[in-house]
Image (cartoon, helix red, strand yellow):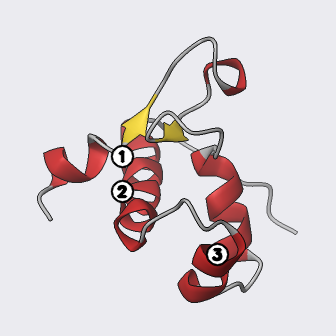
């Protein structure tokens, strides 16, 4: 799937989830899907939990986060 096609599944609407990037206008913020994946849930587990999501909804979340990180500097505290 091309990058432009990937990102077309991510929508931003001030009336949905306070304008956070969401999947296809649904109330699934990209941030939440990334939290599930970072917490160790598999793509299959996320899809089983949220039946109206599609496999092709997951890659756009990763691409969205990649673009955001590439666009600005992030400073992490060293522990």
Q: In the displayed image of the protein, which residue is found farthest to the right? A: 79
| Quadrant assignment for the C terminus | bottom right
Q: Residues within 10 Å of mark 3 (few under 14, many from 20)?
A: some
Camera-nearest residue between 33 and 44: 44
Element under label 1? Answer: helix
* Quarter occupied by residue 19: top right
* Foreground disc of the pair 3, 2: 3
Residue 5 at what x, y percent from top left?
17, 49
Camera-nearest residue between 79 and 60: 60
| Quadrant assignment for the N terminus | bottom left
In the displayed structure, would residue 65 be above or below residue 17?
below
Q: Report, in whole angstroms, how far the alpha carbon at label 3 lies from the one at label 1.
A: 22 Å
Q: Which residue is mark 3?
A: 46
Q: In the displayed image of the protein, which residue is found farthest to the top? A: 14
Left or right: 76 with respect to 53? right
- Circle 1/circle 2 CB separation < 8 Å: yes
Camera-nearest residue between 31 and 56: 56
Q: In the displayed image of the protein, which residue is found farthest to the left? A: 2
Disc with the residue nearer the chain's start (3 vs 1): 3
Element under label 2? Answer: helix
Q: Residues within 10 Å of mark 2 (few under 14, many from 20)?
A: some
Residue beneath the point at 63% across and 62% down:
34
Residue beneath the point at 43% across and 41% down:
24
Q: Residues within 10 Å of mark 1 (few under 14, many from 20)?
A: few
Residue 67: image tag: 1
Residue 36 at what x, y percent from top left?
72, 70
Q: Report, in whole angstroms, how far the alpha carbon at label 1 lies from the one at label 2.
A: 6 Å
Q: Which residue is mark 2?
A: 63
Residue 70 at what x, y percent from top left?
37, 47
């Amino acid at each position: 799937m091309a990058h432009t096609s990937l990102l077309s599944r991510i929508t931003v609407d001030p009336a949905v989830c306070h304008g956070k990037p969401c999947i296809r206008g649904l109330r699934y913020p990209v941030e939440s899907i990334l939290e599930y994946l970072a917490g160790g849930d598999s793509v299959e587990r996320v899809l089983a939990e949220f039946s109206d999501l599609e496999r092709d909804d997951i890659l756009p979340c990763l691409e969205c986060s990649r673009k955001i990180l590439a666009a600005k500097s992030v400073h992490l505290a060293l522990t």
